[in-house]
Image (cartoon, helix red, strand yellow):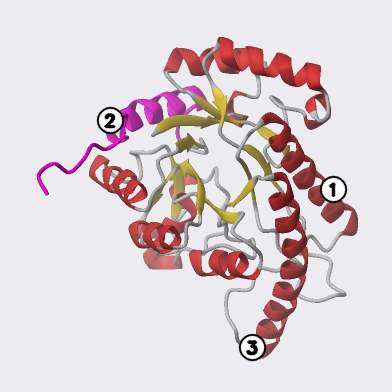
Amino acid sequence: MEIGLHTPPLANESLEGALAYCNEQGVTAIEPGAGGFPGQDHLARADFLDDDDAQADLEDVLETYEVRISALAVHNNPLHPNEHRAETASRELREAIQLADQLEVSTVTCFSGLPAGGPDDEVPNWITAPWPSEHADALEYQWDLALEFWADLAEFAADHGVDVGIEMHPNMLVYEPHGLLRLREATNDRVGANFDPSHLYWQGISIMDAIRLLGDHGAINHVHAKDTRIYESQTREKGVLDTTPYDDEPNRSWLFRSVGYGHDERHWKDIVSTLRMVGYDGVLSIEHEDSLTSSREGLEKAIEFLERVRFDTKPGDAYWS
């Protein structure tokens, strides 16, 4: 298993500066933003798409620092009720898939998107319960839109030989494993998960069970190494659906944390072991969104932690069996 890095925390660095930092830290893969919320500070699509010379230069600098690209990240909302925003997000996603194909990168990471609750609404609507009944109707409307969009997008990804890793994220239509599998089964097997446990912890989802469920369907295309700490004194009072600002840390029910600061080493050893059991032996891409530490310190503590828990070699034969 390789340690990778989702690069937005290094946005103040040039691509070469970010790669030099990764090489210094022993990181062998990056997941640069290529549009959407992650931005594209390190891999602007227009600079590389359909440009053989620019792509050759990129390959050279990656080789120099002994780093590869594990995925291109384009997290946005292609199902947004605002037509312009939806079209922009859709274009970003398609161009990222095309660029991944040209760069021989296997995966594009993204969100499923989230529509409005009806054709006349202007704001995306995250439905969390089937009652009152108009919410169930809204959810059906949303899935109809999503399946139409994703059937076409999945075919486009298949044509380019690129996997799509959807991050299961609340405030998106696909936010848990059953929704991910519903979307995959309605489209094709290029659609899978960018498995990020941080969003599952606070929903009360068992990480190991989620890995096994998705792994049974071959539906884990990429993995984020990101943790969450749940603060029970707050959840006892207001639960986990917490709209408190992320930078009001003492009053939140949960916080995103660097790996090891939400769950201990034994837990993360179970994660990497379960990933290997289901056939995932790829990159653990660190995503830093820990408001209690600086980006550099959070990244470096995560790297040090993952070095202790990851597997560095392939398993041998079970000679004792």
Mark closer to the chain start, 2 or 1: 1
Q: Is residue 292 above or below residue 254?
A: above
Q: How far apart in space, not on screen, are marks 2 and 1 (Cα)?
A: 41 Å
SS of the residue under disc 1: helix
Q: Amino acid at mark 1?
A: Thr
- At label 1, counting other C-alpha atoms closer than 10 Å, the crowd grade (few under 14, some 14-19, many 20 or more) is some
Mark closer to the chain start, 1 or 3: 1
Q: Residue at x 58, y 70 (%)?
A: 182
> What residue does disc 1 label?
88
Confirm whether the magenta stretch covers residue 312.
yes
SS of the residue under disc 3: loop
> What residue does disc 3 label?
132
Q: Amino acid at mark 2?
A: Arg
- At label 2, counting other C-alpha atoms closer than 10 Å, the crowd grade (few under 14, some 14-19, many 20 or more) is few
Q: In this view of the protein, which residue sits in the foreground, 47 or 299? A: 47
Is residue 268 in sight in this rendering? Answer: yes
Magenta region, residue range: 292-321
Extreme residue in the left direction: 320
Is residue 39 in sight in this rendering? Answer: no
Assess whether mark 1 and mark 2 are in contact (beta carbons under 8 angstroms). Answer: no
- Residue 116 vs residue 4: left or right? right
> What residue does disc 2 label?
308
